[in-house]
Amino acid sequence: MYDQGEGKPVLAESVFHTDALARSDRFDFWRECFARTVAPSEITSPRADDFWARQRLVHLEDAWLWPVSLCASRYRRTPRLIRQSDPELLHMSLILPGSGAVHVDHNGHRSVNVPYDIYFLDTSRPYDVSSDGDSPLVGMGVEIPRSRLQLPDAGALSGLLGRRLSGRRGFGALLTQFLVQLSDETGAYELSDAPRLNGVLLDLVAGLVSRELEAEAALPPETRTRNLVLTIRSFILRNFRDPRLTPQTVAAAHHLSTRHLHRLFQPEGVTVAALIRHRRLEQARRELADPALLDLPVQAIAARCGFTASAHFSRAFRGAYGVSPSEYRQAEYQQQAEYQQQAEYRQQAGLSTVRGTGRRGRTSATPAG
């Protein structure tokens, strides 16, 4: 797949939706689609005669994720189906807003999952998953070859399968944030980014699984290091508005020495101080361009974004964007005003054309004989 604007190869992505299918074919097509995406399963639905589903499938390296919304349905993987075909996948589901509750019965665990909950399934073991009544199911599926997940004890997964896990805190929150952003911005990534994104996904899943199993200490050192860096980046993203946020306070919040923190970020090619400054400047730039904040002084925006001195903010902003904050704001508002004027002109021109056509009573461009 290629980006139409620059001709660069982007992440491989395919789309499935039932809208273009005959009503009588939709449910059968979805069963085939699910079998190819995850594994063959017995699927039933109270709306099989009026079924609808929409799915995007994003391929990374050897893992794939699939945002989906569909009507109420039930999925049963039986011992017979496992004997016939087993892709040996670890399936993860993240439930998203707009979904009804999802009931899971797997490996001796039963759970009821609601938005921002996460659960895991093993395609080598029977499962029974269903959504509530007439409520739609909205979420994100992730498929990972079980052999690619680096865990000290593969059998330890048994204690986790089918359980309800939180996607709101810890590694669950990091994983949720990563998946949602990746799904929303697939066009921002090139095909060459797929192995790196795949690695981040595997590390976050391994971190979540190991933390839940209290086996994090047995993870490979490089995976623990990457997980810690991701945790610190998320901490900075949540707290950059606090003017007290510095490399020292970041280190203290994660029980690290400042020296150790700097060593962690050396492979990242950016210092922690630069990361904090960049996040503050980017937020300030967005707020300066926001028409709703026009009456807010520049120094107030600087303070909202964590800068304690307006002179320091002005120097940093000019160094990053080549203009002062005031100049940037003026240029943005002027551009927005010109765009609005052009839009109004086009609208008025369109209305005049319509009215003119009505007065003449003819739309043909053929000259009168």
Image (cartoon, helix red, strand yellow):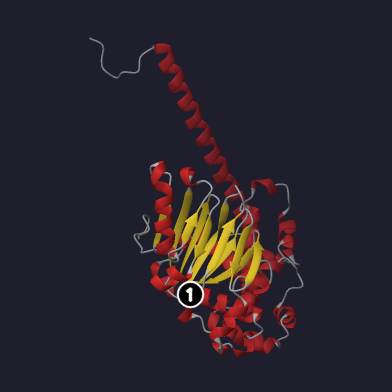
Count of numbered badges drawn on the protein: 1
**On screen, 216 above or below 349?**
below
Residue to which mark 1 is pinned: 124
Q: Is residue 11 visible?
A: no
**On screen, 288 above or below 60?**
above
Q: Position of residue 320 (x, y in %)?
A: 58, 66
Secondary structure under tag 1 reads loop
Q: Which residue is drawn at 48% across and 75% down?
A: 124
Quarter of the view holding residue 273: bottom right
Q: Which residue lies furthest to the left in this view?
A: 369
Q: Residue at x 54, y 78 (%)?
A: 203
Front position in the image: 277 or 211: 211
- The three-letter code of the residue at mark 1 reads Ser
Q: Which residue lies furthest to the front in this view?
A: 80
Q: Position of residue 310 (x, y in %)?
A: 73, 63
Q: Which residue is drawn at 43% across and 75% down?
A: 195
